Image (cartoon, rainbow, N blue to C red):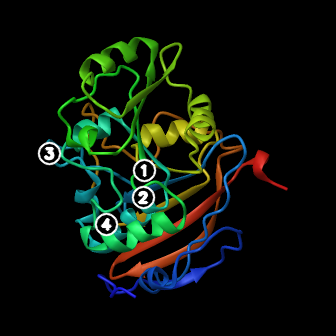
Amino acid sequence: MHPAPIQPYTLLFDEDDAPGPGLPADLQASYGGDWRLPPCPPERPYSFTNFVVSHDGRISFDEPHRAGGGDISRYAPHDLWLMALLRARADAILTGGATLRIAQRHLWTPWATFPAETTRLAHLRAAEGRAPLPLLVILSTKGDLPAAAPALHVPAQPLLIATTQSGEARARAALAAHPHVTYHSSPGATVNLVALLAVLREAYGVRSLLSEGGGRIYGALLRAKLIDEVFTTLSPIVVGNRPPPAAPRPALVEGVAFSPDDPPRLRLLSLRRYGDYLFQRARFFWEKRQG
């Protein structure tokens, strides 16, 4: 058993009774309990997302060179460790072109956020029958990707560009030399997320999908009822908002508004704490998944 690189989380409660494989004992000791990953539905991967949110519900300062989640979490080790664990259980990771431009030096590998866990997370992926690296799926309607971003050139990491028919030509020109890239194009001006997730399940064998897109991608997935779980780190900082006419700082969900008669509903599954941070896991109730 490898020594834990962080102090264990304090488990406040866990009420998850879903089936599915759990974590090995050494990772449970670090995480303060288990995380069972339910089987995927037949038509798409089991999908989960991960956010760090300020006390006032913001996910970004939206300032030059200070727009990433690290400024919200203050780079708390337990938030970075959880991000690594979630990536380790994902067959594919979904992010957006805007996120790629904001975090151009970032790598979407399981151990990029917590290198001390490389060995344990690699063992976890192998034990669960996953490829050494997750498929990186980049959602970009225009296909205008920063071709020099290191995330697009990780050796042996497969890359799928989800775009529109007009965006595919632009993306192909930017990534002509990439040895591992494939494309999924949707007609019209937006990417059909239902079709994309079906392709991930059927053509790529993706059973578990982690979304690391921003508030607009999260909102689009919610609108299509394509998210099963959400992991939320509650950071003990206040971000605030700009007064009009300046653009507001991004919140957790953007680009969609739900009716007060039937908003999406979550069941809180578990809550952990370390210091002044809370780590919440919750599962959505979707009508088609009930019963």
Q: Is residue 15 above or below residue 61?
A: below
Q: Identify the residue shown where x is 63% and y is 37%.
A: 202
Q: Position of 35 compared to 118: left or right?
A: right
> Could you give the CA–CA distance between mark 1 and mark 3, rounded to whole angstroms?
27 Å
Q: Amino acid at mark 3?
A: His
> Could you give the CA–CA distance between mark 4 and mark 3, rounded to whole angstroms?
19 Å
Judged by depth in the image, the label closer to the viewer, 4 or 3, is 4
Which residue is tagged 3?
65
Are the residues tagged 1 and 2 within 8 Å (C-beta)?
yes
Q: Position of residue 59 (x, y in %)?
A: 34, 52
Q: Amino acid at mark 4?
A: Leu
Q: Is residue 164 above or below residue 290?
A: above
Which residue is tagged 2?
87
Q: Identify the residue shown where x is 18% and y is 46%.
A: 105
Q: Nearer the viewer, residue 64 or 47?
A: 47
> Could you give the CA–CA distance between mark 1 and mark 4, rounded to whole angstroms?
18 Å
Q: Secondary structure at mark 3?
A: loop
